[in-house]
Amino acid sequence: MGRPARFTDHDLIAATTRVAARLGPAQTTLALIAKEARAPVGSVYHRYPSKGALLAEAWIESAAAFGLRFRAVLAQAKTIDQALQAALVTPQFARDNHAGGVILFTHRRDDFLDDAPEESRNRAAQQTSEVLHEVADAAKRLLSTDPRGRDKLSLALIGLPYGAVRMFLPHVVPPADLESVIAEAARAAVASCIH
Amino acid sequence: MGRPARFTDHDLIAATTRVAARLGPAQTTLALIAKEARAPVGSVYHRYPSKGALLAEAWIESAAAFGLRFRAVLAQAKTIDQALQAALVTPQFARDNHAGGVILFTHRRDDFLDDAPEESRNRAAQQTSEVLHEVADAAKRLLSTDPRGRDKLSLALIGLPYGAVRMFLPHVVPPADLESVIAEAARAAVASCIH
DNA sequence: CAGCTATTAGAATTCCAAATCTAGAATGCA
DNA sequence: TGCATTCTAGATTTGGAATTCTAATAGCTG
């Protein structure tokens, strides 16, 4: 069955995640990824066809972790107030998954995906659309009255918390009281849909 | 006094702004900037020492244009409600200066400044700090009661609108009704500091 | 144990864009 | 007119990073 692998796929992706969070996708080099994983460059290329493929996997892994938590909150929401709790996933995620948060919230999605193979881009697009669909579902369920409810809810649950954590990342961990401010702002953003 | 210049500094910076807004700083090459300005590469290097210097000038020019409008609103504000109008400068700016808005709101500041000469970085830092100082002044003037007023106000005036326009840029122009949503969210973000 | 194969390993190569270099052109001034 | 000066012009060089290539290894299998 051939020589056993010293490195798992996840080892290499995790190394990519750390380097990319620290330096950004453009400054990330394969030599740095390899050094971070304590692997030679050739071994990395044996698994992944290009730098673009690695960056894409790193983004997808972080996005999947975020999406899982975000959608879990939203899927169960029976009331608008419960749905608005999803806005707090962003600061929470940034706090307990720092590298992932930096990748998702301070770098540009496109800079991780533009050079990715077709297949990776599709999986990335799926991560994105699953989140957006969940928001759209919640809007239909809880805000059916307002035709612009979907846009306002995505602003409240995604745009506003994103802007909030951006004030702190990557250097500062979002402070504990940020959640309350986000909660109030998110509620205000959808207030016009509630009567 | 020597041969007259075919290109002004501003021609070259404007070309840089357009290319960088379209492709991002990393994908921007000197050959593309030169082509956009209809100038040869050598002429560009005659004026600017490096690609980093050009990108920095492009960022600074956009930031100065934004800062001018933002600070003008804030400096005159006598009430909190007037100060909150500054939150609307972000979507307005994104609408009537598309390239500048894309540079400031969808790309990373660091990607424009990391390779800049010391002197450019200083001017960039000054643009940033002038805006932050104006926010701090307004907080002291209008929200002196709350010790965290400064943080909440900068969140309301900068972070939230930033997150909001990010939902649309670079492809979609922020819709007209975005201002009202931002205004309500911004007000909610500082609500806990009033009376 | 001999051969098989997936993997490690890093040196060599290729590629691309930044930056340099040298020449030529256009203007003002003595 | 000739000289100094400033800028245009693009071919050439250089440097760095992505990718490829060729061996060397290490377990597995018959």
Image (cartoon, coloured by chain):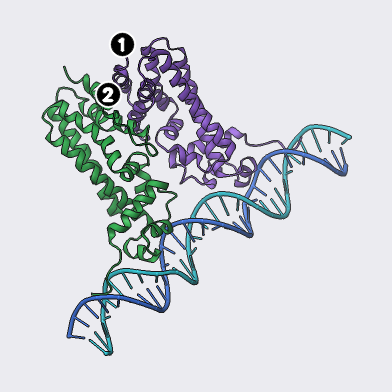
Chain colours: A green, B purple, C cyan, D blue
- Please name the residue shown 34% across and 50% down the image: A17
Badge 2: how crowded within 10 Å, few (<14), some, or many (20+)?
many
- Left or right side of B58 for A2: left
Near-viewer residue (A110 or A12): A12
Badge 1 is on which residue?
A: B195
The answer to whether residue D16 is left or right of residue A132 is right
Relative depth, front residue between B175 and D1: B175
Residue appearing at x 58%, y 44% in the figure: B50
- Mark 1–mark 2 Cα distance, whole angstroms, equals 18 Å
| Up/down of B108 relative to A142, above or below | below
| Quadrant position of residue B144 | top left
On the image, the x and y values in percent for residue B13 come to 55, 35
Residue A152 placed where, x, y %? 24, 26
According to the image, label 2 marks what residue?
Answer: A185
Chain letter behind tag 1: B
Camera-side mark, 1 or 2: 1
Three-letter amino acid code at the position of disc 2: Ala
Instruction: Describe the element under mark 2 as helix, strand or loop.
Output: helix
